[in-house]
Structures are given as C-alpha cells and as structure tokens.
Image: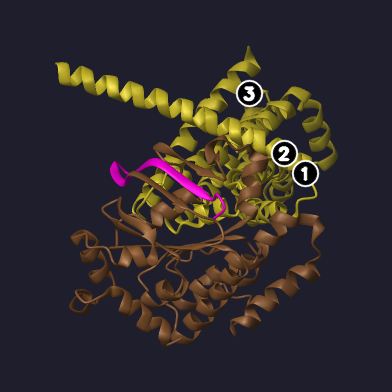
Amino acid sequence: MRMVLEQIGNRVLTTVSNTFYAAGYFYEILKETARFIRRRHVRYGYRVLIMQILFTGVEALGIIAIISLALGVVIIVQGSTILPQFGQGQLVYTILITVITRELGPILTAFIIIARSGTAIATELGNAIISHEIEAYISFGINPISYLIVPRFLGVTLSLVLLNLYFNLFGLLGSFLVTQFIQPLQFAEYLTNLLSTLRTVDVLSSLVKSIVFGIIISVTATYYGFRVEQSSTEIPQMAIKAVGRSFILCILANALITLVYYV
Amino acid sequence: MDQGFELKQVTFRGYGIKVLDNVSTEFPLHSCTVIMGFSGSGKSTLLKVAAGILWPDEGEVCFQGKPLNRMSEKELLEFRSRMGFVFQDSALWSNLSVYQNLSLPLQFHYNKKIEPREVDRTIQKLLLEFDFKDDVQYRPAQLSTGERKLISFLRALALNPSILFLDDPTGFVDNVTAERILKNLKHQKQEGKTLIMATHSPELTSQLADFLIIMKEGKILEHGRLKEVVHSRDPDVIEVLSEVLSEAAVYDTDILELLQDDSSTE
C-alpha cells in the first residue's frame, strides 16, 4: 500500500514539476518572440522562419487542397440531395460553414500539420541535441530558443492560419466548381447564400482555433524535441509523444473553443 | 598571470552519474592549459562547464572574478563573443552548409555592422590558410570526419576569439592538417590568446602547454606547471600519463624527456 502511495505521489510530483517546466518554457518562447519581432533587422533568424513557413505552409498546400475539396464536395452533394427532401435545402450552407469553417477546417489542418511538421520538428531538434549542435549554438551565445524555437513557433502558427484560410477557400469555393460536374448549381445563388450564412463569429472562431492549434503544435513539438537527452533511440519516442500530446491538446482546445462559441 | 577562469568546488552530474566531482581549478589568461586523462574522465565536461555551455549542479565558475551564472545577459554575450569552442565531435550545424556554419557566428555577433563581403573575406582567409578545397556549399554530412573537425576549428576561429576551448583539436585530422592546426595554435599563443585544451597528443602538449591538469574519474589528480606535473611521483598521475601517452615503458625514466623529444621534432 505504501509503495502504491509513493508511486502515486512521485507521479503527481513529476507531473506538477513538468507542468511548471512547460509553463516556464512557454513563457521563454513568448519573451523571445517579442524580442524577435522587435529586432526585425536580424537576418539570421528570418532564414529559419522562411524555411519553416515553406515546409509547414507551402509544402502542405497539395494535401490540404485535396482534403478540403473532397470534404466540400461531399457536403454539397449530400446536403443538396437529402436536405430538400425535408424542405431544408437552405441548411446546406449552414452545414458548410459549420463543418468547413468552424469545425473541420481548423482541426483537420492542425492534424495534417501535426503529422507533417510536428514529427519533423521534434525529430530535428532531438538530433541537434544528440549531435551537440545546441551546445554549439550556446557556445557562440546564440540562444536556441530565439534562433531555433521562435521561428518555428511563428512559422507553424502563421502557416496554420493561412492553411486554414486556404482550406476554407478550397472547401467552400473549390468544391462548388467540382460539384458543377455532378450537380450544377447557380454560382451567384451559391455565393449569396453562403455569404449570408457566414457570420463574423464563424470567421473569428476559425481564426482563434487555428492560432491556438498553431501555438499548441509548435510548442509541444519543440518541447518534446528538447526533451531528448542522450540517445538517438529517444528521438522517435519523443516524436511520438509530441504527436500524441498535440492531438490530445488540439482536440481539447477545439472542444473548449466550440463550447465558448455556444455559451 | 591575469585572472582568468576559476572553478570552485564544481560538481556536474550527467544522467545521475557524477562526471565532475568537486573540482576546483584555475585557467590563467594568456597561457595554455592542457587537460589530460583517460577517455571518460570528464575532460570534455570540464571544458564545457568552464566555457559556460553546461551549468554545474554544485559550485561555480568565475571568469575574471565574476561567476558566470550571475552575469547579465549582455555580459554573458560579451563573454561568449570572446571565446571559441572546438567540439570533440565537431558539432557542426547539420542543416547549414559549410559556409553558413562559418558565417553564422559572424552574422550573429556583428549583424548589420559587418558587410557580407567582409564575412566572405574572413571565411575565405580561413579556408585558404588551411587549404580547404571542398565545396563550401556542402553540408557537414558530405565531409569526412577530419574535414568536419577542421571546419569546427575554423568556426571557432571565425570571431577571432581571445579564449579558445579545444576538445581534441587534432583528433581525426590528417598529419598535414594537424601540423597546420598546431602552427595556428602556436601563433594564437604568441599573440597572447588563452588556450584551454583537452588532448591526448604529446606533441600538442609539449609544444603548447604551460600548465597541465591530470584527470581521473571526474577528479583532478594534479594541476600545475607542465614540468612540475610530468615530474610528479604520484602513482595515479604516472599511470594516467603513461597510459594516455601510450608510453608506459618509457615513463619510468622521465615523461618530460618524451615530451621534449616531441618538441625537438618540430
């Protein structure tokens, strides 16, 4: 019994200690981000930022386009087939906005970024620790948070916001074009109905979600990348943890923001 | 001697193991201190702790009387701009090219105060001095181990530091490059730079060292002027020196002769 209690106690203490550590880490990132933005003339960090946006944002355009198009097409085809049977044809626009703009747009984009960039960031940083590259940065006075983490934090968050916008464009407008081959609709009518359904709060909710998910993914991936200590076998373990935790935190944050939206 | 580095009762644990055990020592400025010991005796860790790359679990490291952990961010940056560190395993930034590895410290410390042309001139001068012929756009993974070590050495020199921490600077490099590194280090020493070096090389030790530190199992066995330490009659020191230098058979005469023999082959 005593051993069980000791183990529980140790776990609680470790969790509390890790939470404080993570909070301190997040504070450091925010502090260095403010500095990074203030010192816009600093050349060396912007290269990393541009590379991160290129990898996280630009290289994910293809897969985002396919998923959003497919989702939009399915909603339009199913909605415009089934809903009129109940005299609720106009609901298709509400469903489109709810599913693509408010719910699946941000979360699916986040899932894609977790799978692509979350793993890559955690692995890259883990490797940098094993090969003492982080120590090399420190030896030159280059703050690894400022040089490695902040550009990834900004790059992933910015990319997620833009990819979410891109997801919406493809999901709402691109899917309309595809639907024309299956079930022709009037574009003017479609656009008018869509815009009349879309409210500022929908856009705001989507934007807030993508920003929060971007922050969660970048902070979690870099945090676990830095948790690698001595052996290369820790790298895949930490990458898996980064992915798992990012998924959980994004889903929880999504639920929380949606709840706030309806309260 | 000017007041340089002072380590006061430093203990460092790596993953629960005591790597440095209550170490107290000094590295005077404008001199060369060589650290010798078996592999795993804590030489690299001692260098990293002295350079402020790793923070000790106990004790403190002072530079010119001021503890590193109590320096302001600005003071620490100033301190780092004065030092160069050559890592045992090179520790080149793998996602940057050779050129970027050499230019990043310059860009970081001088930012807009240095023109790209000046950065280029500094890098070309270094590469020329060491006759580096490979493409500077290569990534470190495309270089041999010896070339990586050389680039790590050149990266440490890029800022023209007054303090050089050298972890096995001639390890893995060919004889010609090792000669060039030795020549450069002699020049640095003549210019009054501070060299703190972990090495197993009798040649580097005999030609550069003013002070010698002998380490074993995370502790300092002996620390003093080169001649004093190599004349030590402490059996542990004799064991370390003879085995490290692979000259156990001749040690019982006089290790100094061995070291002096090396210097005479200069």
Label 1 with label 2: CB-CB less than 8 Å: yes
Q: What is the crowding at mark 3: few (fewer than 14 residues within 10 Å), some, or many (at least 20)?
A: few
Q: Label 1 lies in what chain?
A: A
B73 shown above or below A91: below
Number of the front mark, 3 or 2: 2
Q: Nearer the viewer, residue A216 or B6?
A: B6
Q: Is A5 positioned to the left or the right of B257 in the image? A: left
Horizontal and vertical percent position of residue B155: 59, 67
For label 1, the residue is A39
Q: Secondary structure at mark 2?
A: helix
Q: Is residue A79 visible?
A: no
Q: Is residue B198 visible?
A: yes
Which chain did the image draw in yellow? Answer: A
* Residue farthest along the top direction in this orientation: A263
Which residue is located at x 55 percent, y 56 percent?
Answer: B29
Q: Amino acid at mark 1?
A: Arg
Q: Is residue B9 magenta?
A: yes
